[in-house]
Image: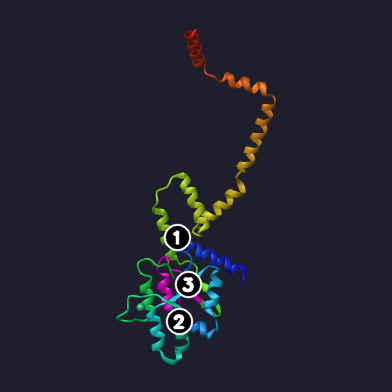
Amino acid sequence: MKITRHKKVHKYLNFYVNNYKFRTPFQVLIDGTFCFAALKEKVDIQDQLPKYFQQETKLLTTPCVIMETESLGPQTYGAMLIAKKFAVHKCSHEKHPTTGSKCLRSMIKNNNPSRYIIATQDRDLQEKVRNRAGVPLLYLHGKVPTLDPPSQASKNEAQHQLDKVDLNVHQRETLAELKQSSGLATEEETKMKKKKRKGGPNPLSCKKKQKKTSVNNTKTSGKVRKRRKAKIPSHVKEMLKTSQNSNQ
Ligand SMILES: [Zn+2]
Protein backbone atom coordinates (compact mmCIF):
# COMPACT_ATOMS: atom_id res chain seq x y z
CA MET A 1 0.00 0.00 0.00
CA LYS A 2 1.30 3.46 -0.87
CA ILE A 3 2.65 5.73 1.85
CA THR A 4 0.54 8.68 0.69
CA ARG A 5 -2.63 6.68 1.21
CA HIS A 6 -1.65 5.88 4.80
CA LYS A 7 -0.88 9.54 5.39
CA LYS A 8 -4.35 10.52 4.18
CA VAL A 9 -6.09 7.92 6.35
CA HIS A 10 -4.01 9.02 9.32
CA LYS A 11 -4.91 12.67 8.70
CA TYR A 12 -8.63 11.94 8.33
CA LEU A 13 -8.73 9.74 11.44
CA ASN A 14 -6.87 12.44 13.37
CA PHE A 15 -9.58 14.89 12.43
CA TYR A 16 -12.19 12.69 14.14
CA VAL A 17 -9.93 12.00 17.11
CA ASN A 18 -9.27 15.73 17.66
CA ASN A 19 -12.76 17.04 16.95
CA TYR A 20 -15.18 14.20 17.72
CA LYS A 21 -13.45 12.20 20.48
CA PHE A 22 -12.86 9.07 18.39
CA ARG A 23 -10.62 6.52 20.12
CA THR A 24 -9.10 3.14 19.30
CA PRO A 25 -10.26 0.54 18.72
CA PHE A 26 -12.10 2.22 15.86
CA GLN A 27 -15.56 0.72 15.47
CA VAL A 28 -16.55 0.06 11.87
CA LEU A 29 -20.28 -0.56 11.45
CA ILE A 30 -20.78 -2.58 8.26
CA ASP A 31 -23.89 -3.01 6.14
CA GLY A 32 -24.94 -5.68 3.63
CA THR A 33 -23.88 -3.71 0.56
CA PHE A 34 -20.32 -3.46 1.89
CA CYS A 35 -20.22 -7.22 2.56
CA PHE A 36 -21.62 -7.86 -0.92
CA ALA A 37 -18.91 -5.70 -2.55
CA ALA A 38 -16.18 -7.36 -0.47
CA LEU A 39 -17.36 -10.77 -1.67
CA LYS A 40 -17.56 -9.65 -5.29
CA GLU A 41 -14.07 -8.08 -5.19
CA LYS A 42 -12.70 -10.99 -3.11
CA VAL A 43 -11.44 -8.68 -0.36
CA ASP A 44 -11.00 -10.14 3.10
CA ILE A 45 -12.19 -7.07 5.01
CA GLN A 46 -11.51 -8.61 8.40
CA ASP A 47 -7.88 -8.81 7.37
CA GLN A 48 -7.64 -5.65 5.23
CA LEU A 49 -9.41 -2.98 7.30
CA PRO A 50 -7.06 -3.07 10.33
CA LYS A 51 -4.16 -2.90 7.87
CA TYR A 52 -5.75 0.05 6.11
CA PHE A 53 -6.35 2.00 9.34
CA GLN A 54 -3.06 0.85 10.88
CA GLN A 55 -4.93 0.98 14.16
CA GLU A 56 -6.86 -1.45 16.29
CA THR A 57 -10.18 -1.87 14.51
CA LYS A 58 -13.42 -3.59 15.51
CA LEU A 59 -15.78 -4.75 12.76
CA LEU A 60 -19.44 -4.71 13.72
CA THR A 61 -22.89 -5.09 12.30
CA THR A 62 -26.50 -5.09 13.54
CA PRO A 63 -29.28 -7.72 13.69
CA CYS A 64 -31.22 -5.76 11.04
CA VAL A 65 -28.29 -5.92 8.58
CA ILE A 66 -27.99 -9.68 9.05
CA MET A 67 -31.75 -10.16 8.66
CA GLU A 68 -31.78 -8.05 5.52
CA THR A 69 -29.05 -10.16 3.86
CA GLU A 70 -30.93 -13.30 4.92
CA SER A 71 -34.23 -12.10 3.52
CA LEU A 72 -32.80 -11.34 0.07
CA GLY A 73 -32.19 -15.05 -0.54
CA PRO A 74 -29.44 -16.90 -2.44
CA GLN A 75 -28.14 -13.75 -4.17
CA THR A 76 -26.87 -12.32 -0.89
CA TYR A 77 -26.10 -15.62 0.85
CA GLY A 78 -22.32 -14.98 0.67
CA ALA A 79 -22.73 -11.44 1.98
CA MET A 80 -24.79 -12.82 4.87
CA LEU A 81 -22.01 -15.28 5.76
CA ILE A 82 -19.51 -12.40 5.86
CA ALA A 83 -21.81 -10.20 7.96
CA LYS A 84 -22.30 -13.01 10.47
CA LYS A 85 -18.56 -13.09 11.17
CA PHE A 86 -18.68 -9.69 12.84
CA ALA A 87 -19.67 -8.76 16.37
CA VAL A 88 -23.33 -7.74 16.54
CA HIS A 89 -24.25 -4.48 18.24
CA LYS A 90 -27.81 -4.23 19.51
CA CYS A 91 -30.06 -1.78 17.71
CA SER A 92 -33.46 -0.43 18.74
CA HIS A 93 -35.44 -2.62 16.30
CA GLU A 94 -35.59 -5.84 18.24
CA LYS A 95 -39.36 -6.15 17.81
CA HIS A 96 -39.65 -4.52 14.41
CA PRO A 97 -36.59 -5.20 12.25
CA THR A 98 -35.99 -2.58 9.56
CA THR A 99 -33.73 -2.09 6.54
CA GLY A 100 -29.96 -1.96 6.97
CA SER A 101 -29.93 1.65 5.85
CA LYS A 102 -32.54 2.81 8.37
CA CYS A 103 -30.93 0.74 11.12
CA LEU A 104 -27.45 2.21 10.58
CA ARG A 105 -28.87 5.73 10.52
CA SER A 106 -30.53 5.06 13.87
CA MET A 107 -27.17 3.90 15.25
CA ILE A 108 -25.52 7.26 14.49
CA LYS A 109 -28.32 9.59 15.55
CA ASN A 110 -27.77 12.12 18.37
CA ASN A 111 -24.21 12.92 17.28
CA ASN A 112 -22.93 9.37 16.83
CA PRO A 113 -22.39 8.68 20.57
CA SER A 114 -20.71 5.28 19.97
CA ARG A 115 -18.27 6.86 17.45
CA TYR A 116 -19.08 4.48 14.61
CA ILE A 117 -17.41 4.56 11.22
CA ILE A 118 -20.11 3.63 8.69
CA ALA A 119 -19.02 1.19 5.97
CA THR A 120 -21.45 1.10 3.04
CA GLN A 121 -21.65 1.03 -0.74
CA ASP A 122 -25.22 2.37 -0.69
CA ARG A 123 -25.01 5.80 -2.38
CA ASP A 124 -28.14 7.07 -0.68
CA LEU A 125 -26.90 6.09 2.78
CA GLN A 126 -23.47 7.54 1.96
CA GLU A 127 -25.02 10.95 1.27
CA LYS A 128 -27.02 10.81 4.49
CA VAL A 129 -23.89 9.96 6.46
CA ARG A 130 -22.03 12.88 4.85
CA ASN A 131 -24.79 15.23 5.94
CA ARG A 132 -24.28 14.32 9.58
CA ALA A 133 -21.40 15.86 11.49
CA GLY A 134 -18.86 13.52 13.04
CA VAL A 135 -19.59 10.29 11.17
CA PRO A 136 -16.68 8.91 9.11
CA LEU A 137 -17.64 7.08 5.91
CA LEU A 138 -15.82 4.07 4.49
CA TYR A 139 -16.39 2.32 1.16
CA LEU A 140 -14.64 -0.02 -1.23
CA HIS A 141 -13.23 1.54 -4.36
CA GLY A 142 -12.79 -1.64 -6.37
CA LYS A 143 -10.66 -3.72 -4.03
CA VAL A 144 -9.36 -0.73 -2.10
CA PRO A 145 -10.87 0.37 1.22
CA THR A 146 -11.33 4.15 1.09
CA LEU A 147 -12.07 6.50 3.97
CA ASP A 148 -14.02 9.51 2.74
CA PRO A 149 -12.44 12.90 3.61
CA PRO A 150 -14.27 14.63 6.51
CA SER A 151 -17.50 16.04 5.04
CA GLN A 152 -18.37 19.73 4.98
CA ALA A 153 -20.98 19.11 7.69
CA SER A 154 -18.28 17.59 9.93
CA LYS A 155 -15.86 20.46 9.25
CA ASN A 156 -18.51 23.14 9.84
CA GLU A 157 -19.60 21.66 13.16
CA ALA A 158 -15.99 21.28 14.37
CA GLN A 159 -15.31 24.91 13.41
CA HIS A 160 -18.49 26.01 15.17
CA GLN A 161 -17.41 24.29 18.38
CA LEU A 162 -14.01 26.01 18.25
CA ASP A 163 -15.56 29.44 17.59
CA LYS A 164 -17.79 29.15 20.65
CA VAL A 165 -14.84 29.31 23.01
CA ASP A 166 -13.75 32.75 24.29
CA LEU A 167 -9.98 32.98 23.96
CA ASN A 168 -7.04 35.10 25.00
CA VAL A 169 -4.06 35.80 22.70
CA HIS A 170 -2.01 32.81 23.80
CA GLN A 171 -4.99 30.50 23.44
CA ARG A 172 -5.65 31.86 19.94
CA GLU A 173 -2.11 30.97 18.91
CA THR A 174 -2.53 27.47 20.33
CA LEU A 175 -5.82 27.17 18.48
CA ALA A 176 -4.16 28.14 15.20
CA GLU A 177 -1.59 25.38 15.76
CA LEU A 178 -4.39 22.92 16.56
CA LYS A 179 -6.29 23.91 13.44
CA GLN A 180 -3.22 23.22 11.33
CA SER A 181 -2.63 19.81 12.87
CA SER A 182 -6.26 18.73 12.67
CA GLY A 183 -6.67 19.86 9.07
CA LEU A 184 -9.19 22.60 9.86
CA ALA A 185 -7.09 25.60 8.83
CA THR A 186 -8.43 27.52 5.85
CA GLU A 187 -6.17 27.98 2.82
CA GLU A 188 -5.61 31.59 3.83
CA GLU A 189 -4.48 30.66 7.32
CA THR A 190 -2.10 28.06 5.96
CA LYS A 191 -0.60 30.60 3.54
CA MET A 192 -0.21 33.21 6.28
CA LYS A 193 1.59 30.71 8.47
CA LYS A 194 4.01 29.77 5.71
CA LYS A 195 4.75 33.44 4.98
CA LYS A 196 5.49 34.10 8.63
CA ARG A 197 7.96 31.26 8.74
CA LYS A 198 9.80 32.51 5.67
CA GLY A 199 10.01 36.22 6.51
CA GLY A 200 10.27 36.73 10.23
CA PRO A 201 13.61 36.75 12.03
CA ASN A 202 14.41 33.66 14.02
CA PRO A 203 14.01 34.75 17.65
CA LEU A 204 16.39 32.09 18.87
CA SER A 205 19.27 33.42 16.81
CA CYS A 206 18.66 36.93 18.19
CA LYS A 207 18.79 35.70 21.77
CA LYS A 208 22.08 33.90 21.15
CA LYS A 209 23.72 37.11 19.95
CA GLN A 210 22.59 38.94 23.07
CA LYS A 211 24.08 36.22 25.21
CA LYS A 212 27.45 36.58 23.49
CA THR A 213 27.65 40.32 24.16
CA SER A 214 26.74 39.85 27.80
CA VAL A 215 29.44 37.22 28.11
CA ASN A 216 31.97 39.71 26.71
CA ASN A 217 30.84 42.31 29.20
CA THR A 218 31.35 40.08 32.19
CA LYS A 219 34.94 39.54 31.08
CA THR A 220 35.58 43.25 31.62
CA SER A 221 33.56 42.84 34.75
CA GLY A 222 34.46 45.99 36.65
CA LYS A 223 32.43 48.30 34.44
CA VAL A 224 29.31 46.22 34.61
CA ARG A 225 29.35 46.02 38.38
CA LYS A 226 29.84 49.74 38.69
CA ARG A 227 26.93 50.41 36.37
CA ARG A 228 24.69 48.14 38.42
CA LYS A 229 25.62 49.96 41.61
CA ALA A 230 24.83 53.29 40.03
CA LYS A 231 21.30 52.08 39.35
CA ILE A 232 20.32 52.17 43.05
CA PRO A 233 17.91 55.09 43.28
CA SER A 234 19.12 58.04 45.33
CA HIS A 235 16.18 58.01 47.73
CA VAL A 236 16.96 54.41 48.64
CA LYS A 237 20.52 55.40 49.33
CA GLU A 238 19.28 58.18 51.57
CA MET A 239 17.10 55.76 53.46
CA LEU A 240 20.01 53.35 53.90
CA LYS A 241 22.19 56.19 55.22
CA THR A 242 19.58 57.43 57.69
CA SER A 243 18.89 53.90 58.92
CA GLN A 244 22.64 53.36 59.43
CA ASN A 245 22.89 56.66 61.30
CA SER A 246 19.99 55.88 63.57
CA ASN A 247 21.52 52.47 64.39
CA GLN A 248 24.74 54.11 65.52
ZN1 LIG B 1 -31.83 -2.41 13.63
User: In the rendering, at what x and y percent does residue 209 appear?
Assistant: 66, 36
Is ligand 1 within 8 Å of the beta carbon of the residue shown at mark 3?
no
Q: Nearer the viewer, mark 1 or mark 2?
A: 2
**Classed neighbour count for the residue bearing mark 3: other residues with Cα under 10 Å, few (<14), some (14–19), many (≥20):** some
Indicate the amino acid at tag 1. Asn
Question: Which residue occupies 53% across, 63% down?
Answer: 11
Of residues 233 and 88, which is closer to you in this image? 88
Type of colouring: rainbow
Mark 2 residue element: helix
Between the residue at mark 3 and the residue at mark 2, the CA separation in whole angstroms equals 13 Å
Q: Nearer the viewer, mark 1 or mark 3?
A: 3
Mark closest to the chain's N terminus, 1 or 2: 1
Residue annotated with mark 1: 19
Indicate the amino acid at tag 3. Lys
Question: Which residue occupies 47% across, 72% down?
Answer: 58
Compared with 189, 225 (above or below) is above
Between the residue at mark 1 and the residue at mark 2, the CA separation in whole angstroms equals 30 Å
Residue 90 in which image quadrant = bottom left
User: In the rendering, at what x and y percent does residue 122 appear?
Assistant: 44, 79
Answer left or right for 219 relative to 186. Answer: right
Q: Which mark is residue 62?
A: none
Between the residue at mark 1 and the residue at mark 3, the CA separation in whole angstroms equals 21 Å
Indicate the amino acid at tag 2. Ala
**Classed neighbour count for the residue bearing mark 2: other residues with Cα under 10 Å, few (<14), some (14–19), many (≥20):** many
